[in-house]
């Protein structure tokens, strides 16, 4: 009887001890055999900086800790690896392979021997931004690894989109009994940790949506104001001499679009709601263009997309060849004024928006502007216009913006499910993932 009682009492305890031992085995440093990129990836899942022991002479543990704290304090998905020149780190593929093994969307910087390079998912940072940052670091010819990495991280922290991975909050170099007991309690109660992480991720996403909506509100309010000023400048009266029913219908439609845009923006709760606002403004501007043609006795305008460079310019009049910085040429619709500027070799009057890195063209300002642009150009057409830019690549992702955010943000787990064309930066000499665009000879030059 006593033996049976002991089994009843100690059975659950033994199960809990076994579970704790399993957790310790998995999480304790050095508990599994790994080397090369596997070791680097395992470390970067727990914290932002990894230094291969063979490269410790170039970047000390103190310097690594300070850099990791800087990244964590910024709450950005920036990953840094300091690696030696070794066969397990092939320069042509090391960035893509490290990104694949870590499986988290972000900015990845590698110091490889005496060379530096970086890459990023375009939802986090555009290809051109990464290229420029890598080029700036290389051309600065910093004498130490610490100076190179800190310079890059300072800029990347300011420009990267997204948040630090949740796993970093729990990451540490040690594993003590108290932690084991805490994990055991979580195992015993079941699911508590997972629920807390899910709730924190949801709150982060909601906060990101609120911030994105406020950024969009500034831009959309400017668009609505500009459209109202166009209505005033038109100075049309339904009862004026020569006005007919068609003119009055155009004018009424433009007024309705103006009111619809204002009401929709006031009611917007999510970034995706903005698409309906800019759809109304695009429709209203075409009505104004039609009304202006009727009053002047000119042929009615063809229904075309608005000017690509700034939808406030109104309907486009022609299609021209244009290429974004570092990108391939594509056909875009333009207004008469921008066509003239391009014909004269001048830059078009591009719509810029405010970002953490300063004013940028809307197509290079991050994913928050997808619904704004989608309302003007149509969600199906815009990605083709913007191939190779941050916004275009994001919109071609499987879960592009519609009613709100979609797809993995910076710091979210994506596993190996990412496109090589959607992860790039300062690469050249045939290496990397975007086929070129490197600086100072490209690749891992010194």
Image (cartoon, rainbow, N blue to C red):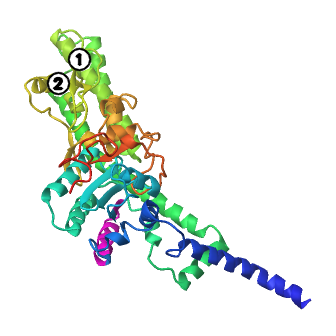
Q: Are marks 1 and 2 in contact (CB under 8 Å)?
A: yes
x then y, percent, for residue 300: 24, 11
- Give the residue number, with chain letter if any, for mark 1: 291
Residue sitting at the far bottom: 2
As for residue 415 lying within the magenta part, the answer is no
What span is in magenta?
Answer: 62-80
Q: What is the secondary structure assignment of the residue under circle 2?
A: helix
- Residue 1's place in the image compared with 313, above or below, is below
Residue closer to the observer: 378 or 115:
115
- Give the residue number, with chain letter if any, for mark 2: 234
Q: Residue at x 26, y 47 (%)?
A: 218
Quarter of the figure that contains the C terminus: bottom left
Q: Is residue 138 left or right of residue 199?
A: left
x then y, percent, for residue 380: 40, 29
Query: In this view of the protein, can residue 137 be seen by the observer?
Result: yes
Q: CA distance from mark 1 to mark 2?
A: 9 Å
């Amino acid at each position: 009887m006593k033996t049976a009682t002991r089994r009843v009492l100690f059975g659950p305890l033994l199960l809990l001890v076994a579970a704790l031992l399993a957790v310790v085995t998995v999480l304790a440093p050095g508990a599994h055999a790994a080397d090369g990129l596997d070791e680097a990836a395992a470390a970067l899942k727990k914290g932002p900086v990894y230094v291969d022991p063979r490269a410790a002479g170039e970047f000390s543990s103190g310097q690594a800790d300070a850099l990791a704290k800087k990244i964590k304090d910024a709450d950005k998905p920036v990953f840094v690896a300091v690696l030696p020149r070794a066969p397990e780190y092939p320069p042509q593929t090391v960035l893509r392979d490290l990104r694949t093994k870590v499986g988290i969307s972000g900015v990845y910087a590698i110091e490889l021997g005496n060379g530096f390079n970086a890459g990023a998912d375009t939802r986090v940072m555009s290809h051109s931004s990464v290229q420029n940052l890598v080029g700036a670091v290389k051309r600065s010819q910093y004498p130490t690894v610490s100076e190179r990495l800190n310079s890059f991280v300072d800029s990347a922290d300011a420009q990267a989109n997204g948040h630090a991975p949740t796993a970093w909050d729990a990451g540490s170099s040690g594993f003590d009994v108290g932690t084991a007991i805490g994990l055991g309690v979580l195992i015993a109660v079941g699911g508590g940790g997972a629920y807390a992480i899910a709730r924190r991720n949801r709150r982060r996403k909601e906060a990101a949506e609120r911030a994105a909506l406020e950024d969009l509100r500034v831009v959309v309010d400017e668009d609505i104001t500009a459209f109202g000023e166009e209505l005033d400048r038109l100075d049309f009266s339904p009862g004026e001499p020569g006005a007919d029913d068609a003119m009055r219908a155009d004018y009424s439609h433009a007024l309705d679009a103006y009111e619809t845009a204002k009401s929709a923006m006031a009611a917007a709760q999510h970034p995706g709601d903005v698409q309906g606002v800019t759809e109304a403004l695009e429709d209203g501007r075409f009505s104004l263009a039609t009304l202006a043609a009727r009053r002047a006795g000119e042929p009615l305008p063809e229904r075309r997309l608005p000017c690509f460079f700034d939808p406030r310019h109104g309907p486009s009049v022609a299609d021209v060849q244009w290429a974004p910085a570092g990108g391939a040429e594509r056909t875009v619709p333009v207004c008469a004024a921008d066509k003239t500027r391009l014909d004269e070799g001048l830059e078009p009057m591009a719509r810029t928006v405010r970002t953490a890195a300063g004013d940028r063209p809307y197509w290079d300002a991050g994913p928050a502007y997808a619904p704004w642009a989608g309302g003007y150009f149509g969600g199906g057409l815009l990605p083709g216009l913007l191939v190779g830019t941050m916004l275009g690549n994001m919109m071609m992702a499987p879960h592009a913006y519609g009613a709100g955010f979609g797809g993995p943000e910076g710091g979210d787990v994506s596993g190996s499910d990412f496109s090589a064309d959607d992860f790039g930066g300062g690469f050249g000499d045939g290496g990397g993932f975007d086929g070129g665009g490197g600086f100072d000879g490209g690749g891992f030059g010194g």
